[in-house]
Amino acid sequence: MTRKLKTRAIHAGEKPDISTGASSPNIVMSSTFTHDEPLGFSINSFEGESPFIYSRWSNPTTKQLEEKLSDLEEAEECLTFSSGMAATSAVFFSLLSSGDHLVISNVNYPGTAELVRDSLPRMGIEYTAVDTSDLKMVEQAMKKNTRLVWVETPANPILRLTDIELVAEIAHSRGALLAIDSTFATPIGTRPITKGADLVVHSLTKYICGHGDALGGAVIGATDVLDIIRQEATVHFGGVMSPFNAWLIMRGIATLPIRMEAHQQSAMAIAEWLQEDSNAQSVCYPGLASHPQHELAQRQMDNYGGVLSFTVPDGKGVAIQLAKSLEVVHYAVSLGHHRSLIYYLDTLELNASSYHLDGLELEKYMTVAGEGLFRISVGLEDSEDIIDDLAGVLGK
């Protein structure tokens, strides 16, 4: 019997402690583990997953989190890392080599964009950044040496969507893997493996933790691919998650389905208020019928998430007013927390630092973002209180 999502979020990967009967997961902080017989000293001594030997290789607490995440994503296996960027780096530096080619979304988390632009070429890895919502552009970007297609959907910060099933067909027809950064969607909204993706990447710091108190990242997918990443990224690069952070993130996952329902409900209410009763010029949220890809959102997402963006006249000036006046919403970076967070992203500054879009691609970005947009991550406060807080500056 396959249990429902809320049940799996609580119970998957967790068992009562054998020695004490403790119901909640233990935090195993030990860096090393004893054995009854001599074992190999190198990871190369083992095929696949090794027993618990040293916590850079594997740890009982992080293992429980990995089992929970792979269950929620309906995948074979999961590896956790110290941050979302550590997880992203693990995929690139484990699966790509000099002479390989990467196709990547041209709008995504700025840290990812900067990593690809600044670091991969130094290692002889080519890349092509395109609008992955345009399947013709994805097709045209593919080369004989393309090994990986990387898509972020919904894309940060303009909430552009990519059809995972169709891009998976393109990638696989050329012998490439497809990785999806599904941080905004979470497994409550989208499970990319079930739609043809080979890998799912999360910044666990965001919704999956949900409380803004622990950094973490995850790569989820098939065992044969994750065995490669485990050897390279966890054992050799060492960017592993601390057991304490794993415990905090497991605590957050227990309420993830309930939280995502609340995030979506409040985000829709705030998006509708911004559209109807504020001085916003444009509002972008996948749950709105006005979103240009709302039909795809309906097919691909079971939950539209809690992030929306909007533009207003004189965005920089409004940002200063909001930063000084907000009481419920925090003017701060990041997203997916129980607290509402808002931040202004100037288009030209972000493009200069991260995206390097030009011509038509910059024009397409600016049709959503204008000269700059506000990204709001709607928290778990009452939506009426969030609206009242914003209305002091944004109300008509």
Image (tube, grey):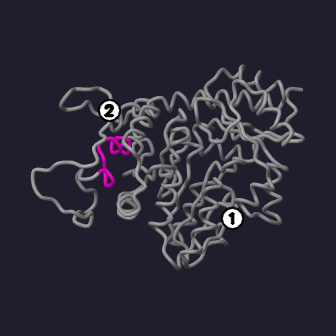
Which corner quadrant holds the N terminus?
A: top left
Residue at 37% across, 64% down: 236
**Residue at image mark 1:** 130
Instruction: Say which element carries label 2.
Output: loop
Main secondary structure of the magenta stretch: helix
Instruction: Say which element carries label 1.
Output: strand
Residue at 48% across, 56% down: 199
Q: Is residue 150 above or below residue 120?
A: above
Q: Residues within 10 Å of mark 2 (few under 14, many from 20)?
A: some
Is-magenta flag for residue 390?
Answer: no
- The quadrant in which residue 6 appears is top left
Q: Quote the CA–CA distance across marks 2 and 1.
A: 43 Å
Q: Is there CB contact under 8 Å for labels 2 and 1?
A: no
Does any portion of residue 314 appear in the rendered image?
yes
Residue at 55% across, 66% down: 171
Give the amino acid at mark 2: Pro
Q: Please report whichever mark, 2 or 1, sits nearer to the chain's N-terminal start.
A: 2
Q: Nearer the viewer, residue 226 or 316?
A: 316
Q: Is residue 37 above or below residue 176?
A: above
Give the amino acid at mark 1: Val
Q: Is residue 156 above or below residue 214?
A: below
Labelled disc at residue 25: 2
Residue 216 in the figure: left or right of residue 222: right
Residue 259 in the figure: left or right of residue 333: left
Q: Residue 110's spot in the image, x, y percent?
A: 65, 55
In the image, the segment drawn in magenta is 55-67
Q: Which is closer to the viewer, label 2 or label 1?
A: 2
